[in-house]
Image (spheres, rainbow, N blue to C red):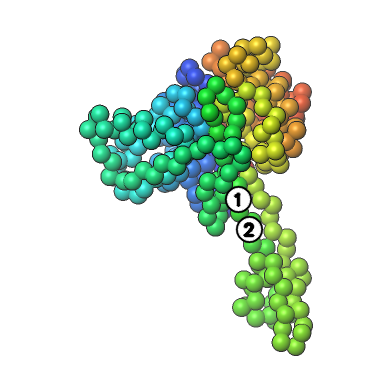
Amino acid sequence: MSFSVTILGSGAALPTSRRGPSAQYVECNGRHILIDCGEGTQNAIRKYHVHLQKITHILISHLHGDHYFGLVGLLSTMHLLGRDKGITIYGPMELEQIIRLQLEVGGSKLNFSCNFVVLEPKEKELIFEDKMLEIWTFPMKHRIPSNGFQIREKQKERPLDAEKFKEDKLSLTFAPILKQGHDITMNDGTVIYADDYTFPPPPIKSYTYCSDTIYFPEMIKHIQGSTVLYHEATFLHKMIDRAKATFHTTAQQAGEIAKEAGVFKLLLGHLSSRYESAEEHILEAKAAFKNVLAVEDGDVIDI
């Protein structure tokens, strides 16, 4: 099973030749999720060979255009390509009205259902789960309501110690129970311990997406221990006043958040179009947190 993120758009409000507006594609253990959908997302999907029709969940962080202006076009393309499988879209309350009105005035009718789920979290909330993963949302602090997201694996089974299992001639019917970590008590009182016949389960991995937000330490409790954290770094710290005025974060502040949250890796994105290079952003963030990467469009990150 795989867990990866493809960066479809890594820039802020103004697109450039190198960076499109915010959009990311997450593949987690066979599940296909789009996070934000800025203008040009469907072009990036084609360019970077993402499976368009496999997407089943779309997460929209907030209603600034660089995070959702590509959504109605993406849905229309799915329709034109013959999609008949429903899709679930999570976002602010007004999102459904905006999308349905755009379709209506253009005389468009989709051949698949769109289920809109309103996000208004006051604390961290579970918005989707199945046997493979969970999707959580939590509030951030921006000029308008803005949501962060965390995609988290479910605990996987314990790997079976096949050699010991065979050596002790245990019944294969015991395997599913032991792999779940449960001990088995036989009729004669003998106990077959899961720890003796399985290995510890692999660690749970998680990916957290935080864009857009002002420096907001209150959300650290929601992102604690993430395997990979994507955090906006719109400005360098010498523009801290501009960051505060526009409710954005500097690269230095993103590094501080990553350190306090105890994450494994930090991805910087949502860079202002004024920056031709992300080298200074990386140096700033590394002053607080060492494992840093500034993403670019087309990057694929294994979680």
Name the residue rendered at 63%, 44% in the picture: 206
In x, y percent, where is residue 88?
42, 44
Q: How many marks?
A: 2
In x, y percent, where is residue 144?
52, 24
Task: Check disc 1 and report its element: helix, strand or loop.
Answer: strand
- 3D distance between C-alphas at marks 2 and 1: 8 Å
Location of residue 195 with respect to 48 vertically, above or below:
below
The amino acid pointed to by label 1 is Glu
Q: Quadrant of the C terminus?
A: top right
In x, y percent, where is residue 160?
68, 67
Residue carrying label 1: 153
Residue carrying label 2: 156
In x, y percent, where is residue 52?
40, 41
Query: Can residue 159 be seen?
Result: no
Dot 2 and dot 1 residues touching (CB under 8 Å):
yes
Q: Crowdedness of circle 2 by 10 Å Cα count: few (<14), some, many (20+)? A: some
Mark number displayed over residue 301: none
Name the residue rendered at 45%, 42% in the picture: 117
- Is 137 on the left or on the right of 58, as rendered? right
